Image: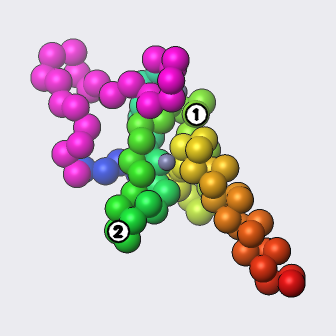
Amino acid sequence: MKFRDGGRAIVCSRGGRRWPKCSVRGCSLPGRYQCDFLVVDGETCDRYLCWTHRVRQRNPGVDYCPEHDREAHESFHQQLRAALE
Ligand SMILES: [Zn+2]
Ligand SMILES: [Zn+2]
């Protein structure tokens, strides 16, 4: 697990460390993880995800949101199909 110190996390001086809520609709768990899916060059999705909604990738420390995990699978299969044709 890695922490970003890009200053995006909401800092609350009272009550110690606070995490933004998980970005998945209807989920109110703290979003301690962020989606690492590359949306544009050098820019990652950065959606906040709780430990139940983060989707761990093969590379250690890399998590995707459920949407991007699906997208990554689909593009992987597309590449596979293209390679086999
Ligand atoms: Zn969640
Ligand atoms: Zn994402």
Colouring scheme applied when the structure was drawn: rainbow
The image position of residue 6, as x and y in percent, is 22, 51
Ligand 1 within 8 angstroms of badge 1 C-beta: yes
Q: Is residue 84 left or right of residue 25?
A: right
* Residue at (44% x, 28% y) in the render: 22
The residue that label 2 is drawn on is 42
Ligand 2 within 8 angstroms of badge 2 C-beta: no
Classify mark 1: residues with Cα within 10 Å, few (<14), some (14-19) or many (20+).
some
The image position of residue 2, as x and y in percent, is 41, 51
Labelled disc at residue 64: none
Q: Quick one: which residue is furthest to the right in this view? A: 84
Q: Nearer the viewer, residue 72 or 16?
A: 72
The residue that label 1 is drawn on is 53
Q: Does any portion of residue 67 appear in the rendered image?
A: yes
Q: Quadrant of the C terminus?
A: bottom right
The stretch of residues the image draws in magenta is: 6-28
Q: Is residue 50 left or right of residue 45?
A: right
Q: Is residue 55 left or right of residue 21?
A: right
The image position of residue 49, as x and y in percent, is 47, 35
Secondary element at tag 2:
loop
Question: What amino acid is at disc 2?
Answer: Gly
Q: Main secondary structure of the magenta part?
A: loop
Question: What amino acid is at disc 1?
Answer: His
Q: Nearer the viewer, residue 74 or 11?
A: 74
Q: Does any portion of residue 56 appear in the rendered image?
A: no
Q: Does residue 10 sit above or below 78 in this rendering? A: above
Secondary element at tag 1:
loop
* Residue at (62% x, 50% y) in the render: 69
Quote the CA–CA distance across marks 2 and 1.
23 Å
Residue 36 located within the stretch drawn in magenta = no
